[in-house]
Amino acid sequence: MDKKLEKIVQALQEKFGSSIEEFRDEVHVFVKAEQIVDALTLLRDKYEFELLSAMTASDYWPQTSPRFHVIYQLTSLAKNLSVQLRVLVNGDQPRVPTATRVYEVANWRERELVDMFGIEFEGHPDPRRLLLPEDQDGHPLRKDFPLGYEEPQFTFNYEEIDLRKPYAKE
Amino acid sequence: MGVEQKLGDMGIVTTKLEELVNWSRTNAMWPMLFGLACCAIEMMAAQASHYDMSRFGMELMRASPRQSDLMIVAGRVSRKMAPVLRRLYDQMPEPKWVIAMGDCASCGGVFNNYAILQGVDEVVPVDVFVAGCPPRPEALIHGVVTLYEKVKGEKFKDFAVK
């Protein structure tokens, strides 16, 4: 781990009691959902992590508690550092406080996560759909979402599928 | 249509109305100017000087559906885009035709998932499917010429009584 980053991670550990995971020189800091806004504010204001370069989630189904990791990738342009915060969320009622008051860019990221994973962001200023059509059911990036949409039409099953394919009218 | 052979000294041509209408339609078919994905790049190449679709009387891409009579669906259509595509089709005046360009528009191509329509014929009636991923400009031009063959075979009683 980078020397400069080590101090920052230690400070996070002391303040929030968070655990650490390292993978190929990337540092993942696990914080609790109710701490995330404080942790982001601390990193932004004190340690110059001025950029939320990515925000995404990961589904660990069939594991249900925790089922999701909500991932905040922070970058410090001033110090040339990068750190990842992770929030563990349970599957039955996935809920995280919104980060839009710390990083404005989180607005659309969180709307995307609502669409794709069904994770609720409490206090989001504009909780509309972002990517999917209004009538979409389910959350496509969840692991238990069915993969295929339609059976491909080949020579051997052409007629069978042709019968039930919803062709457009004039 | 071979007008030259029918042209006598009097400067008069006799032909069937059906053939005349179909001839005029095939020689000024204006596609709508829109592309959805990578197939649109090949469509642009087909338009540009190297392949030059205007040789076949389709030199103008119209940016408005009200002025176009051919819709080339170039690329994959997402489920969110499908209502928009249908609306564009509805805004085109009769007579109108549709070419599904490429595998994605024809049958979903490599995308078999929640986001992509499995063939644009679920939304609009398609006249010609052009295979390829993406089809080369020659293939698109061949598709258009195939459509011309279809249009030339249309009967007056079918399109007049609509």
Image (cartoon, rainbow, N blue to C red):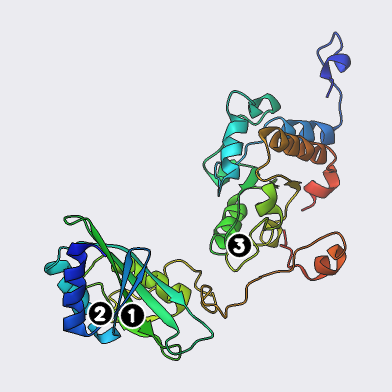
Q: Nearer the viewer, mark 2 or mark 3?
A: 2
Query: Residue at image x 63%, y 72%?
Result: A147
Disc 3 element: loop
Disc 1: which residue? A87
Residues at discs 2 and 3 in contact (Cβ within 8 Å): no
Mark 3 surroundings within 10 Å by alpha-carbon count, few (fewer than 14), some (14 through 19), many (20 or more): many
Discs 1 and 2 share one subunit: yes
Q: Earlier in the sequence, mark 1 or mark 2?
A: 2
Residues at discs 1 and 2 in contact (Cβ within 8 Å): yes
Q: Amino acid at mark 1?
A: Val
Disc 2: which residue? A36
Instruction: Pinpoint residue B53: horizontal percent, then vertical percent.
Output: 65, 29
Left or right: B138 as drawn, with respect to A9: right
Is residue B101 at all visible to an observer of this figure? no
Q: Amino acid at mark 3?
A: Ile
Query: Residue at image x 64%, y 26%?
Result: B51
Q: Nearer the viewer, mark 1 or mark 3?
A: 1
Is residue B17 at all visible to an observer of this figure? yes
- For this rendering, which residue is in front, B68 or A158? A158
Instruction: Pinpoint residue A75: horizontal percent, then vertical percent.
Output: 25, 61
Q: Is residue A81 above or below residue A101?
A: above
- For this rendering, which residue is in front, B47 or A21? A21
| Identity of the residue furthest to the left in this view | A46
Query: Residue at image x 12%, y 68%?
Result: A45
Left or right: B72 as drawn, with respect to A76: right
